Image: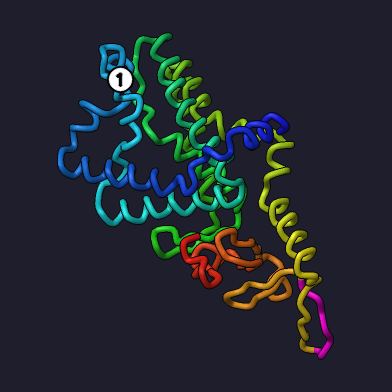
Amino acid sequence: MNFLNKLERKFGRYAIHNLMLYVSILYATGFIVNQINPQFYQEYLMLDIQKLLQGQVWRIVTFLIQPQFGNLLFAAIGIYFYYMIGSALENTWGAFRFNLYYLSGLLLNVLAVVVNYLVTGVSVPLGMDYINYAMFLAFATLYPNTQVLFFFIIPIKIKYLAYLDAAFIGLQLVQAIAAGEYFLAVAIVLALGNFLLYFFSGRNYKRFSPNEVKRKRQFKSQVKSGEKGSNVVDFNGRRQVTRHKCAVCGRTELDDENLEFRFCSKCDGNYEYCMDHLFTHEHVKKPGNDNH
């Protein structure tokens, strides 16, 4: 982690803030292109190493707008979902580390396609699938108990969807190995290398997990304001001290031991929210700071 700290101190000022906004615009562009001409992406934009070596160098960049959604409704929901989880990762890690995670995923996917092509002579169209898988798995690892509406109806914790994704990726690996396509299996693992690097390294995960980030923010908050907690009266008239309280609904850890709380880095001040309101609340801005 000392290496990452040095990188951040040296290059942190070049980090792209709100990176997922720009990525979301690329996803939306891919959807529009696909609606106009469904074959245009595959013929001229996707990462095809053979055509790249023939001089179509723009493909190393244009593959980023891979169409991922078939209709407007799913495009709107999918793009918003990726924007939400990407923004959550940036809020947790900071802009530089999230940039590094996402961009290293892009580079590893390109490397995976190149390695597979050099060995087998076949250009495998990995596209953006494994980049999105890596981002989703990172979010699920950090926020496993966040709930989403599966099929827009069924509330389900994000960790269970991550298990399904992991099972799907595992099935792809088994199928590739069973078919003798060993380098395709290697390419899949390499494409997920940023996730494996960050989250199978105990030191990295522990230091930048939400609990550790929250603990540091809470400590700074208490040092700054001198607040040690809020007094809550229980049903027996006794006062109890709580450590967490949602600024929207007012719930504390005494209301439900499974509740998780996070501080919002975009609010001016030390405002803490439960997971139900972390991504939906209106950011608090001090007068004169509207352009933050």
Q: Where is residue 46? Give x, y as percent.
A: 29, 28
Q: Residue at x 30, y 20 (%)?
A: 57
Q: Where is residue 134? Give x, y as percent.
A: 51, 38
Q: Is residue 8 above or below residue 123?
A: below
Q: Quadrant of residue 38?
A: top left
The magenta stretch is: 236-242
Q: Is residue 98 above or below residue 262?
A: above
Q: Residue at x 30, y 25 (%)?
A: 59
Q: For numbered disc 1, what is the local secondary structure?
A: loop
For badge 1, the amino acid type reads: Val
Colour style of the rendered protein structure: rainbow
Using the image as rendered, state which of residue 58 and residue 232 is in the foreground.
Answer: 58
Q: Is residue 141 above or below residue 116?
A: below
Q: Residue at x 30, y 17 (%)?
A: 52
Mark 1 sits on what residue? 57
In the displayed structure image, the side of residue 140 where residue 2 appears, left or right: right
Q: Is residue 113 visible?
A: yes
In the displayed structure image, the side of residue 83 where residue 28 appears, left or right: left
Mark 1 residue crowding within 10 angstroms, few (<14) / some (14–19) / many (20+) = some
- Residue at the bottom extreme, as displayed: 237
Q: Is residue 19 above or below residue 129?
A: below
Using the image as rendered, state which of residue 153 and residue 13 is in the foreground.
Answer: 13
Q: Is residue 281 visible?
A: no
